[in-house]
Amino acid sequence: MDIDLSGHVAIVTGGNHGIGAAVSRRLAAAGAAVLVNFLRVTTDESLPPGYIQGRAASADPVVYSIVDSGGRAHGVEADLTDEGTPHLLFDEAEARFGPVDILINNATGWVPDTFGGEREDRVGRAIVPVSPETIDAQLGVDARGSALLIAELAARHRQHGLSWGRVVGLTSGGRLGFPEEVSYGAAKAAMENYTMSAAFELAERGITANIVYPPVTDTGWVTDEVRRHVETSAELIHIVGPDDVAGVICYLVSDHARFITANVIHMR
């Protein structure tokens, strides 16, 4: 399917690795200019090295790969828990590329926490008790940060008199609870709700808003134990790569999907 995003400008959060990096490259390959937002973070040392390195990396390799392929991209490191970050990101994107009309809310403040007393989850990853810090880390990025970015997109959309826009968020469920990742699940549920509200409130302005719910996606954290868990699960079917998810997102922001809004797109 031919997807042409020439003339469009995207902000992708969490774009230094995994799904965010794949989405940034895919959108740029389709012709969009991409502002790649990222924040280098240190994760638990019990996780696979590839995942740790990805979360701690800058977006330079992603940006360079886009530019070297003839695309347009720029990286900005900024913390989405800072209330000034949405304004900063949109200012940077507008100054370099023009008004933003595509927003991909991919970043997460993921910290696995629990109401129980366990120190490891079912696949051997370290988990910690629920605390103000674990709540704020995740709701601050996945929920509050995403909502403020949508609000900034809507405000700039009105300011510039645009008639086309796309919002896509990434979820992993959580609407009915997310054992062993309880704050992550709550944050994703809130982000889903904000995005559905945006879909209805902004539809008359030509903005669609959808959520993508990928299968288990190997962004460096999938271990043999995780693979065995997927194989024995009644709900989990596939383990996919970041580019598989990026392809769905690229379709959703294209004109081919102009009538698709207010959906949680489940990939299996």
Image (cartoon, rainbow, N blue to C red):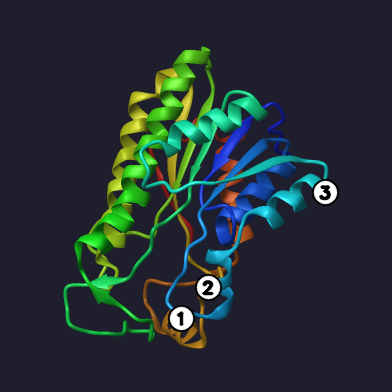
User: Residue type at mark 1?
Assistant: Glu
Question: Could you tell which of marks 1 and 3 lies nearer the N-terminus?
Answer: 1
User: Residue type at mark 3?
Assistant: Asp
Mark 1 Cα shell of 10 Å, populated few (<14), some (14-19), many (≥20): few
Which SS class for mark 2? helix
Structural distance between the alpha carbons of marks 1 and 3: 33 Å
Mark 3 Cα shell of 10 Å, populated few (<14), some (14-19), many (≥20): few
Structural distance between the alpha carbons of marks 3 and 2: 26 Å
Proximity of marks 2 and 1: CB atoms separated by less than 8 Å: yes
Q: Nearer the viewer, mark 1 or mark 3?
A: 1
Rendered location of residue 111, percent (x, y): 35, 67
Which residue in the structure is indicated by mark 2?
52
Indicate which disc residue 68 carries: 3
Proximity of marks 1 and 3: CB atoms separated by less than 8 Å: no
Of 108 and 231, nearer the camera is 108
Question: Could you tell which of marks 2 and 1 lies nearer the N-terminus?
Answer: 1
Q: Residue at x 75, y 51 (%)?
A: 64
- Whether residue 264 can be seen here: yes
Which residue in the structure is indicated by mark 1?
45
Question: Could you tell which of marks 3 and 2 lies nearer the N-terminus?
Answer: 2
Please identify the quarter of the rendering in which residue 172 is found: bottom left
Structural distance between the alpha carbons of marks 2 and 1: 7 Å
Proximity of marks 3 and 2: CB atoms separated by less than 8 Å: no
Rendered location of residue 44, percent (x, y): 42, 76
Above or below, comparing residue 208 to residue 104 in the picture: above
User: Residue type at mark 2?
Assistant: Ile
Q: In the image, is 239 to the left or to the right of 262?
A: right
